[in-house]
Image: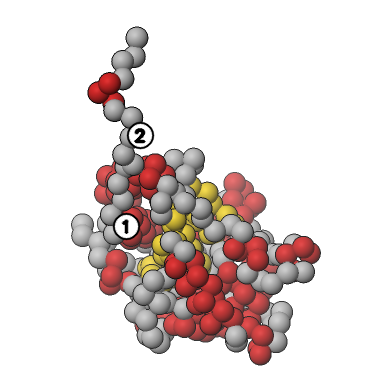
Amino acid sequence: MKIKPDDFRITPGSKVNLAKLPTAAEQNISKQDGHEALRPMIKRLRELQEVLYAQGKHKVLVVFQAMDAGGKDSTIRNVIGPLNPQGVRVTSFKAPTPEELSRDYLWRIHRETPGKGMMRVFNRSHYEDVLIVRVKELVPRKVWSKRYEQINQFERLLYDEGTTIVKFFLHISKDYQKQRLQRRLDRPDKHWKFNPDDLAERARWNDYQVAFEDAISQCSPRHAPWYVVPAEHRPFRNLLVAQTLIDTLESLDMKYPEPTFDPAKITID
């Protein structure tokens, strides 16, 4: 099965209409076949991540955003989870703390960006400040409307300082979200994942769709692209994210560092 990430990449200047983009993959692949296809991809990702860490030159930032029940945790668990945790860290951004609220909204984000040799994964991100903040009117329009350009400048700074950025929006339908939320209610082992407040957020579905469309449309430059991933078919979702990360890491043309000694002259007794 050939996955083509460029088919899902948002080109700079595009006006995104999520209603016209697929939430489920056209290719039908079984769960078992998906697992089989993912296995060599994970192996390749491990190899690339090892070189990333060993070389200590490049920095990689991976951003995941989605509506509630969109599959962020599952995607990270299946694609990022098997990688070496020594070189990968996942950060989940919840409601800001009082200390974070006392500073600019990007402060808590910037301090979590990757250092050399590291991959950082954001489960939610700085985009919450043009999503939930906008929809729930936590700040005035004149404040959040300036943040698209501020975010672009922030990501440009990271890029200019050597960070490779890739962003995934896991795209689902409202009906699919209902199924996933109902599953959390129906299964006692999933009750911990259900939050009654999610229903209030679900009631704002249309507002969130517009907010996501604006964020993706205005913040997908060539150096920090968005990929809109059809996320209802989970095997395809995982394969697409994995292939995108493989292509991204391979584009860095990484190499293991040269030894500072002559291995041929080393004898281990």
Q: Nearer the viewer, residue 256 or 175?
A: 256
Q: Which mark is in front, 2 or 1?
A: 2
Element under disc 1: loop
Q: In which quadrant is the N terminus drawn?
A: bottom left
Label whose residue precedes the other's in the sequence (2 or 1)? 1
Element under disc 2: loop
Dots 2, 1 in contact, CB < 8 A: no
x then y, percent, for residue 188:
61, 48
Identify the residue position indicated by label 1 in the image. 252
Q: Nearer the viewer, residue 239 or 124?
A: 124
Q: Amino acid at mark 1?
A: Leu
x then y, percent, for residue 170:
44, 67
Task: Residue at the far top: name it.
Answer: 269
Task: Residue at the far bottom: name it.
Answer: 142
Identify the residue position indicated by label 2 in the image. 260
x then y, percent, for residue 237:
37, 60
Residue 239 occupies which quadrant of the picture?
bottom left
The residue drawn where x is 66% and y is 85% is: 143
